[in-house]
Image (cartoon, rainbow, N blue to C red):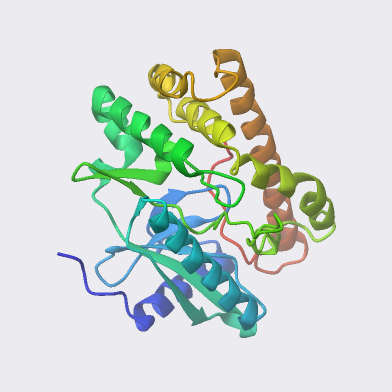
Amino acid sequence: MNPEPITDTELEVLEHDVLTALTTGDASRLTLLGEGEISLVLAGGEDRSWACKRLPPFTDSEAAERYAATVERYLGALTERGIDVVDTTVRSIAGDAGRTVLYCVQPILPPDVLGVAVARRDPELGGGLLERIVDVVLGSVDKRFGLDAQLSNWALVDDRVVYLDVTTPLLRDGAGATELDTDVFLASLPWLLRPAVRRFVVPGIIDRYHDPRVVVLDLAANLRRERLDQLVPVVVGASGGRVVPTLDDAEILRDRRLDMVTWGALQGVRRVDRAWQRRVRRRPYPFLLPSHPHT
């Protein structure tokens, strides 16, 4: 039985706790469920039954509405391609300083159904899950529709393979332009760096998620991050003869290292900027960051 929908009041309480953490550095009132490269997943609701992913605040309410609409289109695209996705709503509340805050809200799933937990508990079942993920990727990803298919973005619910990560809607229009408002995620970088990252880094990152072979490569490489190296051959085998050239261990290791360097550098810049804002400028840093560097 699904829990009652999280109320606006409960979301406002969560946002108040987030702002308290940003202002004071004390995050003890927040319950962290997961960490991504861009944002964090927090437990929300009076009974902490909702996974709430907070997007960086929007200074323009119309931009927030456009972003929410893009997420809704992405949910539709997932369904059209036969991909099961966890029930998701995008909720908007008023933030501080006239900003608009979006939360992507999903019911919290039992920890033992999450993809990484499944693979660690039962490698054979995890291997079967990975094979099914490879099938999904190779049957759906194209120039118009992208997917971040790493194992941590999936769950196995009653033998259904369920996708979780929809806050980065990887859609392109007919002209090949991304529908994702990348400025939302660049906002946490120092303003001097944003033009260079927007021009030289972001296009390459987006391109990766629209190439089926690279998405599968990323799936295999991220298994090393999760200390599931023994399951890398499952992904190689499941994609063998279906991607050209065939994946090999050397390429998977290179991709893992590139991922560490790219995201580690971006996180490092954010941490330096946070320290500058807090210690030198004596003002709150307005973004939540992962607690550990990308490894």
Q: Is the C terminus in the top left, top right, bottom left or bottom right quadrant?
A: top right
Residue 230: % across, % down:
39, 17
125 vs 134, left or right, is left
207 vs 74, left or right, is right
The answer, for residue 27, to whether it is visible in the render is no
Q: Residue at horizontal 42%, vertical 49%?
A: 34
How many numbered dots are placed on residues in this image? 0
Residue 170 image-quadrant placement = bottom right
Q: Farthest front residue?
A: 174
Q: Is residue 90 above or below residue 35?
A: below
Please name whichever residue, 38 or 128, is drawn nearer the observer in this view of the structure. Answer: 128
Residue 45 image-quadrant placement = bottom left
288 vs 281, left or right, is left
Q: Residue at horizontal 70%, vertical 57%?
A: 177
199 vs 262, left or right, is right
Please name whichever residue, 238 or 151, is drawn nearer the observer in this view of the structure. Answer: 238
Q: Is residue 162 above or below residue 120?
A: below
Q: Residue at horizontal 36%, vertical 51%?
A: 82
Q: Is residue 292 above or below residue 78?
A: above
Q: Is the N terminus in the top left, top right, bottom left or bottom right quadrant?
A: bottom left
Please name whichever residue, 91 or 189, is drawn nearer the observer in this view of the structure. Answer: 91
Residue 76: % across, % down:
43, 63
Q: Is residue 72 above or below residue 38?
A: below
The answer, for residue 123, to whether it is visible in the render is yes
Residue 253: % across, % down:
59, 20
Residue 135: % across, % down:
40, 34
Q: Farthest left residue?
A: 1
